[in-house]
Each structure stands twice: as C-alpha cells, then as structure tokens.
Image (cartoon, helix red, strand yellow):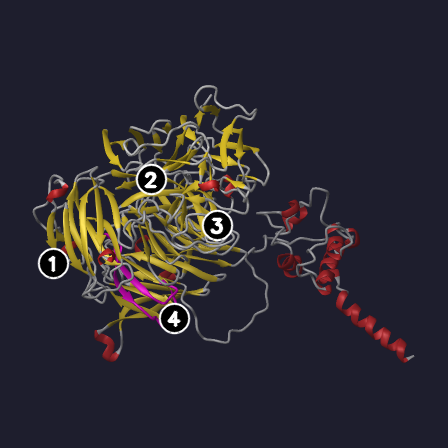
Amino acid sequence: MRRQFQLLFAFAALTSVTTVRAADVDYVRDVQPIFKKYCTGCHNDAEPEGKVSLESFKSLQQGNPDGPNVLPGDPANSLLVRLIRGQDEPQMPPEDEERPTDKELALIEAWIEGGAKGPEGAAPDRMQLIVPEIGSLTDRRPISAVAISPGGDALAVARYAEVTLYRKLRGDGEDRKKLTWQPVQTLTDFRGKVTAVHFVSGGGRLLTASGVTGLGGVATIWEWPLNRKVREFVGHRDLMYDAELSRDGKVLATCSYDREIQLWNAQTGEPLRTLSGHNGAVYDIAFSPDGEFLVSASADDTCKVWRVADGTRMDTLGQPLKEEYCVAFSPDGRRIVAGGADNNLRVWDFVSRDKPRINPVAIARFAHEGPVLNLEFTNDGKHLVTIAEDRTIKVWETQNYTEAKLWENEPEVADALAVSPDGKEFVVGRMDGALNWVSLKGIENSASGNVHAGELATTIPAAAERSKAAEQEPNNAAENAQVVQAPADITGVIDGMSEGKADVDLYRFSAKAGEEWVIETNAARSKSPLDTFVEVLTADGQRIERVQLQAVRDSYFTFRGKDANQSNDFRVFNWEEMELNEYFYANGEVVRLWLYPRGPDSGFNVYPGTGNRWSYFDTTSLSHALGEPGYIVQPHAPEEALIPNGLPVFKLYYENDDECRRALGSDSRVYFTAPADGDYIAKVKDVRGFQSPDHKYTLTIRPRQPDFKGTLHNGNPQVSAGSGKEFKVSVERLDQFDGPVEVNLGGELPLGFSVTSPVIIEAGQTEAYGVISAAPDAPAPTPENSKLTKVTASASIRGEQIEHDVNNFGEIKLAEKPKVIPRIVSVDGAAGAEGPLEVVLHPGETIRLKVQVERDGFDGEVKFGNEFSGRNLPHGTFIDNIGLNGLMLLTGQNERDFFITCAPWVPEQSREFHLETGEAGGQATNSVIVHVKRD
C-alpha cells in the first residue's frame, strides 16, 4: 500500500510539471522566448539554416521546404515537436547544444494543442528581452559615450539605458562666481545600452544609438531640452554601435554587430540602402566633411570607404592586423585615421573620390601598448587624441603624426572621448563611471617646417672629391639636421641623451630626382661598439617608401626555424606553388628563392645559394621561428595602385640595420634613389638604443658606383690525360651590380689542352663553372707554356662595356691517368660526332641523358653530388629525381640515366654544363651544350 502511494505521488508531481493548460500559454510571453533561447541562433530570418526560421510568428508560419513546422491542435505529429523529442531526424537542437527542459517543451506542446495562435494586435517588439532580473552588486555605472555640443555649452554622458545632459551653470553661494557642469536633463527611454551620443542641429538635438545584444538596435533623434523623441530608426539584427548624421542633416548612418551599415533618410526615417561587405562587427563609422563618403571600422581587421549616394565600396583599407575599433576623417577630408586591436594608428591619404581606388597608407604608428579604443580630432585638425586599453591617453600632431603628449596610468580604462569645439580641452569617460577633463593648452606641434640653410651641392662630385666633416650637435631632429655637402665622409659619435631619448644624428644633403646614392657606416669594422641603423628621410624627417610588397601567397615555416645566416633548407608550407626568383617576406626580411626543394624532406635554398644568405631591399637578415608566417610577395612602385587580394601589403622604406649582402658585418648600408629634387636626411642611431663616447662611426654619403671583381678558383690545375678538371669563376658584385658577367679564358694553353670559354655568370648569380681538359695524347706542359693563360671579365654597366683582368690559371700540369674517367653521352650511348654533345631543352620539359664511367682499378661508389650536381646548368635548370642521396653510380655500376628539368620561366640560351666527381682526385666530365629553346 505504501509502495502504491509513493508511485501515485511521483506521477502527480510529474503531471504538475509537464501538464500545462493551452488557454494559459501566450506566444509572446511563453513560446517565443524559448525559440530565441534555443533555435534562432541558426534558424533566423538573416541566415535560415535548412530554410527554416523561428524568429517571428510570421516566419514560423512559412514552414519548411517539406511542409509546415507545426500542425495546430496536433502537437504529437508536429514536425517541430518530433524533432525536439528526437522522434525525427535530425534531432533539434543538436546533441552538443543545450536542449529545452520538460517544462519548456510542455509549453510548446500546449500552445500547439491550443491552435498555435500568434500574437494579437500590433506585432510584438522584437527587442523585448524576456530574462530574469538580476540585481547589480555594484554601484559603478560605466560611461559608454560622451559628446560636447558645438557651442561647448552642453555635455551628454551616456550610460546603460540612460543619457544625462549637463550645462555650464553658476553654482550657489561661494560657487556663484564659477561655471560648473550641472545636470539639467536625463533621457531614459532606451531599450538597452547606449553606445553613441552626438549633438546635431547646432546642439539643440541629440542623436543616440542603443539596442539589445542579439536582438536589434535603434537610433533616436531627441529634442533633449524637452525630453522628446523626434524620430526613431529601428533596424539591424544586433546591438547598434554607432549612429552618425551627415553635416547637411539629410542622411543618417548606423552600424551594428550584425556586420552591416544602414543608411536612412533622416527627414522621414525611411531606410535608403544597406552597405554589406564587412565580415565582422562594424564598431564605428564616420562621414567625410562633405557628407559624400562614409568610412567604417570593423572586427574583420579592415576599414572600408563607401560612397553615400549609391553605396559603392570605394576601397578596403586592409592594412590593419586585427580588429579596428575607431575611425575618422580628418577635418579637411584629406585623410582617414583609424586604430584598433593591433595597437597601431594608421593614416591613409584619401584619394578614392571619383572612382574606387587604393587609398595609400601615409603613416603607420605603433600608438599604444594596448588596443586603441577611440580617437577624435580637434576642430582645427592640428591634433588627434587617442585613448587605449592600456589606460593611456595620447595627443598627436597631425603633420607627421608624431606623439605630442602622453598621459599614463589612468585609474580605469576609458572608452568615451569628446574634444571641446575650441580645441582647448577634452573629456574622457571611464569604465568606473568617472569623467576626466584634460587640458590641451601648451601642446605644440613637434614637427617644424624650417629647413637649415647652407651651401648644398647641385651636382654630384667625383668620388675623389668627397668632402670631410665632423658631427656638430645638436643634430637629433629634422629641424636641426646638420647640413653636409655630398659626397661626404662624416665622423660622429652616438652619445648624449635628448629629452630622455638616446642620441640620434641627422645629416641633411641634397639630391636630384633619379640620382642613386649609397649611405653607409663604418663602425663595427673599426672596432666601435656601435651597432648602426641608417635611414634616409624626407626633409621634414618622414620615412621614404622605396617599395610596396604585395603578398600573393601565404605560408609559414615548417619543421624548424631559421637563424640569421642560413641560406639552405627553407622549409615552408605550400612550397609546391612557389617559384624560383620569387621574393619571400618574413617578419620584415625579404629573401629570394634560389633552388627548389628536392622533395618533402628538404627545403628551398635562397640567394646567393651558399654561405650567408642575402636579403633584399636593404632588409636585414633575422632569425625566424617555427610556424612564423611568411608570404610570397611581388614588388610594386610606392605610387602604384594595387588591387586588393585579401593578403597583406608590406611597405618598405629606405633603411638598413646590417648590410643586406653581408659585406659590412653589422655596419649599415642603404641604396637610395632620390624620388624628387630636394633635400634629404641621413639618420644614424644605435639599433639597440645604446650610446657612449666610444660609439664612434664614419658615415659615408657617395654616389652609387656599380662594378664587379672577378676571381678564378682552382688554380695550378693538375689535369689527367683523357679527362678534365673543374674550375670556378666567381664575381664580387659591387654596389648591387646584378648584370651578367662574361669571363673569357684566353692567352696560350699548353699543347693538347682545351678550356670552356667564355664562361657566363648569369645575372644575379655569383659564380659559374667550366672544365679544363687534356687530350689522351697531350704532352706535359713545358715551363715556358704552362703559365701563359690570360683571363678577363667583362660586363655592360650603364650602357658602357667594362672589362677587368682576372687572375689566370697559374701553372698547368699534366697528371697521371685517373682511376675513374666520367663522361656524359646521350641515352643511346652516343657522344658528339664532331665537337661537344648538344641537346635541346624546352622550358617546362624534362630530358634524359646518361653518365658513364671508365674504371681502372676503382670499384667503389662514384658520387656526383646532390642539389649542385648539375655543374653550370642555366639557373632554373637542374638534375631531377635524385632524392636525398644525390646522383651516383653504385659499386660496380658503370652507367646510369639521369634527368634534367627546365623550369617554365627559363629564358632562351645556350650554355655548357658538366658533372664532377670527387673520386680519383676530382674528375670532370666532358662539357655538354644545352640549348634552351621556346617553341
């Protein structure tokens, strides 16, 4: 009996939870909140997954592609209920999502049982949030936005669901002589957080933005003295972050977390158009001063420029690395300034007025140690105020966007900012609910347009006419840069603090457009502790862009990182889609791909192919970590308008830490081409910020003089009869001369000897190889004819043929017949009928040849090398399919086929190549002529 009573009690308790009277269920109050909680994240009007939306009763009635969602009066057979109960597939919500409780499901079933009736009368407020009220445990009321009226006599302070208006009034008693901000009005009719406030119509009206997270937003124009709403603009599908009114008062723009921008007719409240294109929340918007353009800042790491009249996207400013939180046009409309989560302040020249164009980055500044949260110009446009998450405030002069003033260690993060109309002060609103007024008086522009007068060179003197000068302080700013007559050698020292900063030395010189100059230091080579960094700046101290590198393919380092010297085994992701001679950018360093990987267990070699690697555009070699991003980049002129491709564009400037081709150790060298007639500044500093009286240097400013020095290696060869000996010629390229060099090996060879000539060192390469051979019946050279060779190297430089003598072979001797004689033949075993063997190779093609060896008492392996086995092949042509063991003949093997592959870009040419083995004292094969021909 007791057992039966317990079961009856449990059944009654369960019934009390799950049984709901249909008449007591209201769609708006009971059902729609359940759909919002569990369903509308996926099944909404904007993105109806499965073409089903439960966002509103109207959407619910539209059903799904296979029929209705609910059957009024029949919950058991309604698809909605069956999916929730898991009786049909797929179960909703999915298994890994929170599910309705039994009580909530009972409400839905009771509502369907009662006929699935919708709301009566006016449509329900879509921004009505039905949640339990949870009381706050603190009295702190963070300030979300502030605004100052155009006349400077009114202040608006926004907090959650409230805006308080203040006026400057005289106080009572002793305060009657002093004007203070006193509250005069409070606006409270808001649905949620107030995110933006702006005075409009001369200050008599107030524009606010507010909304409810996940539901929608509303912009409101108020006659604030009367606490009366003039017009509401209800839209978006999430919280509205900003609302802006054009200067003529005709167009209202709003932005939201829903990634969209809405334009409205401000006079009627009707929507004009929606601007879509951002892939993240839109945090801020701003009209251009003429009202014709709008700029937006977004969580998708971009700002976008829009034409208001038709909604055309004029440009995407894709340089930011993280979310952009704030953006503004300069008061003159010539520039766009933005800041965000990458801690940077970026300034673009606004040029996309008549048609979509690239707006070039004019200035990029590391602004704060934390995300930049807000920024605002003074009305005269001379200063910009920024506030950041690191609790700092900065004022910037806007000629060069250099820091003019810093306030540190604010008590709390400030998110709200407003500058007074007269530009004398600004106010910030903090998260602790406090206002902080800050004066701008006494802040002057740090940049000056004054230029030192002096006798500046109007022509480039010869190198022998370099002037001599010694550093004269002060010379640590553009306005007091020391004037020198270039070309010049200047001796100086990095020592002496200035305004708490380490010493820098600036020297002003003049140049004409197109002139090529070299600015280099001698410090470390003279045992100075100074580690120099050299820049070339404009006359007012701005960096000069030398090239913009547009990324066309993204990658990252795999397997292991790289030190600052390594030129081989660059293992990078997606290497298969990369090509030789392409530039690879990583963390500010630019290298160039020289040789392909030999498979997945190897990596690229970068220029020059061996030894310490080169960097390009005067970048400095750095260490790189495993997983560090890298990009294949293409160079473009600074003024060239680039088509965005979704990957970064890197701008490089005339500057250098360590000379890029490693010829000067840690000393610096910059190759500078003057973009226009005028004055320029050479700046020297210690890259680490160190200084002392011993940090001495010599700075040289001289014309670029491209040239070369040739060297023949493997001198005094001992050549075996019937075989050949390899030699190498190398070139030291001076002042970045990168043209081809022809090495002619002439004079008089001993009887029976022959040599590869001429040997061509290809453009951009540093070495080439040839073979000196002895006929099987060659007599031994005599003392008279063994040293008569003559070697010269020539190249065309600036239209003039330049020739230099090169060291000769020295003494040539005849050696004994070797134990191994290798030779190259065609696949059928034939050699050249008359003269050397010749083969034709088309770009993108692989051909096959055969290597044979004649053994005489040697039965071991004969190795011809790995990635460098094809000696003197055209660049981009290589011995293929050799794996990691290289090209070799195994023990007892006398011949094998090998393959030569030619990259698709290799130009037409004819070139002799050979193979070389280190066995038997080093023996080279006969030379084979490869003709690269295009169809």
Dot 4 amino acid type: Glu
> From which residue to which does the magenta span run?
388-414
Q: Which mark is residue 412?
A: 4
> Is residue 765 something that shows in the picture?
no
Query: What whole-number distance in Å separates the C-alpha atoms at marks 4 and 1?
Result: 45 Å
Name the residue located 44 percent from the left edge and 38 percent from the top edge: 580
| Residue 32, horizontal then vertical, whole percent | 64, 57
Would you call the spot at circle 1 few (<14 residues within 10 Å), some (14-19), or many (20 or more)? Answer: some
**Is residue 855 magenta-colored?**
no
Query: What whole-number distance in Å separates the C-alpha atoms at marks 2 and 3?
Result: 43 Å
SS of the residue under disc 3 = strand
Would you call the spot at circle 4 few (<14 residues within 10 Å), some (14-19), or many (20 or more)? Answer: some
| Residue 223, horizontal then vertical, whole percent | 37, 57
Sequence-earlier tag: 2 or 3:
3
Mark 2 or 3, closer to the camera: 2
Sequence-earlier tag: 1 or 3:
1
Dot 1 amino acid type: Gln
Sequence-earlier tag: 4 or 1:
4
Please tell me which residue lies in front, 331 or 487.
Answer: 487
Task: Using residue 61 as the reference point, say whether residue 207 is left or right of it.
Answer: left
SS of the residue under disc 1 = loop
Give the residue pinned by disc 3: 556
Residue placed farthest to the right in the image?
1
Please tell me which residue lies in front, 490 or 482.
Answer: 490
Dot 2 amino acid type: Gly
Give the residue pinned by disc 1: 472
Figure check: 514 above or below 669: above
Dot 3 amino acid type: Tyr
Mark 2 or 4, closer to the camera: 2
